[in-house]
Amino acid sequence: MSESTDSQYLVVSNREPYRHDWEGDDITVDRPNGGLTSGLDGAMRRLGGTWIAWGDGDADREVVDDENRVQVPPDADEDQYTLERVWLSEEEQENYYLGFSNRVLWPICHAALTKVESERRHWEAYREVNRRFADTVAERVDEESVVWLQDYHFGLAPSMIRERTEHDPAIAHFWHIPWPGPDTFRACPHGEEILRGLLGNDLLGFHVDRYCENFLRCVDELIPMATVDLDAGVVHQPDGRLTVRSFPLGVEADRIQEQSTGAASHARFREFADEHGIDADGMLALGVDRLDYTKGIPERLQALERLFEEQPDLRESFTYVQIGSESRSEIPAYEAVQAEVAEAVERINDRFGTDDWRPVVYETGYVSNETLYALYRAADAALVSPIRDGMNLVAQEYVAAQAEDPGALVLSEQAGIHDRVGDDVLSVTPQNTDEFASAIREALAMSDKERERRMTSLRREIQRNDLESWTETMLDEIAVVDASRHGR
Ligand code: G6P
């Protein structure tokens, strides 16, 4: 077991790392399987502490003690930590999660202003749920605690935590989506309250420097009490000081590399190709996305359509596979993009498909990590084309999965990761259909030597800044900020 106490590290996120669900009369545990929750789970198992999250599983309530707590992972032989659930009513889920978080903050931060829908009940629920999480944290903290909040669901919680405790914990926050410039942020309903909420942190992290600057400029323009030092990345306030820094989020590069190479991965790809009527020896491009209007999927399909129009020799020899997971479908803008993608796929397949070949294979069902990594490994190109994206982990996972005979990466300039790898990818503006179609053509025609050269450099970058290094760097910086506050 770890030596730290339950109150030392307190991670707060909307999604829980383990969910319990009924399967007949049995309770199953869904473990984190890749991505951020898996990375943070690793860190928490090592450090110990408490992870506070919305209890979303249908059997979550069956496994907790009187204080809503359960030890995870379930196997007591492993290092464990405490998972504490916060329960949300359906109305709160509707108004806090589907409402203010995803109808206001998500589109504002992605500069999709026409998608913003703001209602008073959304804001009230967001405030109430932030209060509830802040209460839960405040009950657990002591002088030595480090509170680490994740993402845009908790814009108010940092200041609320400060108000609710006599102790002086270190509070850090990582904002996983972009932060827009002041012109855009001014359109945010209750934007000043969100800024004041975030000023309760000691440390605020974003993926890239641009978002840090945007945030600092918003504070400078909208919060008169705060003094912003843009060069130092610091906000001075009468009762504290906030450091704003970039921490580029990475992926579990070694694990992905391990799982995507080898005979099993190759066999898994052949199985997928068989099931979906794909010629496993033909050329293949891949897209993997949550079905979100920020991901640029309709734009990508338009570029593919242009390519099939202009280059008939690609017909029957090249297939595009789109893996799409449904997300936030209760929100009309999400429902609309799902319908738009399905229609575009059908149109392209009707226009160009033959008896033996479908140009676009669209899979919206469950795809295991094993299959996903096998597809990454097999694809000659990955098409990652968000209209705007905080970082984008799919591009990084694709790179991590490449070994000998690698593929090429076509990447939107609007993904945060582009700031780090722009020289070695085929850069596109997703709305520029002709340019995008040419980039796909170039990716498919690229010489082995050129792919190898680019991928070697990409892989080095992705391995150096992987998920573990993100976690460590952020924890180190929290310790530095904490020490300077306490004059240690
Ligand atoms: C983005 C957000 C995460 C969120 C994820 C999935 O990456 O930054 O906080 O968990 O999308 O979305 P969902 O709404 O299903 O949690």
Image (cartoon, rainbow, N blue to C red):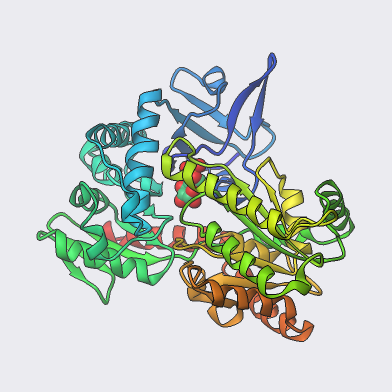
Q: Is residue 10 left or right of residue 168?
A: right
Q: Quadrant of residue 388?
A: bottom left
Residue at image point 56% right, 17% down: 62
Query: Hey, which quadrant is residue 8 in on the image?
Result: top left
Q: Nearer the viewer, residue 322 or 390?
A: 322
Query: As drawn, is 350 to the left or to the right of 416?
Result: right
Quarter of the image holding residue 228? bottom left
Quarter of the image with the N terminus in it = top right
Q: Position of residue 273 (x, y in %)?
A: 83, 53
| Rendered location of residue 58, percent (x, y) | 55, 22
Q: Is residue 394 left or right of residue 473?
A: right
Confirm whether residue 172 shows in the render: no
Q: Is residue 269 visible?
A: yes
In the picture as drawn, the residue positioned furthest to the top comes out as 25
Residue depicted at 45% across the width and 17% down the height: 66
Q: Nearer the viewer, residue 416 or 290?
A: 290
Q: Answer above or below: position of 284 versus 50.
A: below
Q: Position of residue 111 (x, y in %)?
A: 34, 59
> Which quarter of the rendering shows the C terminus?
bottom left
* Residue 108 against residue 309 in the figure, above or below: above
- Which of 262/309 is in front? 309
In the rendered image, residue 327, in percent from the top left (x then y), is placed at 52, 42
Q: How many marks?
A: 0
Residue lying at the far left in this picture: please name it.
Answer: 224
- Left of 319 or right of it: where is 94? left
| Identity of the residue drawn at 85% across and 59% down | 279
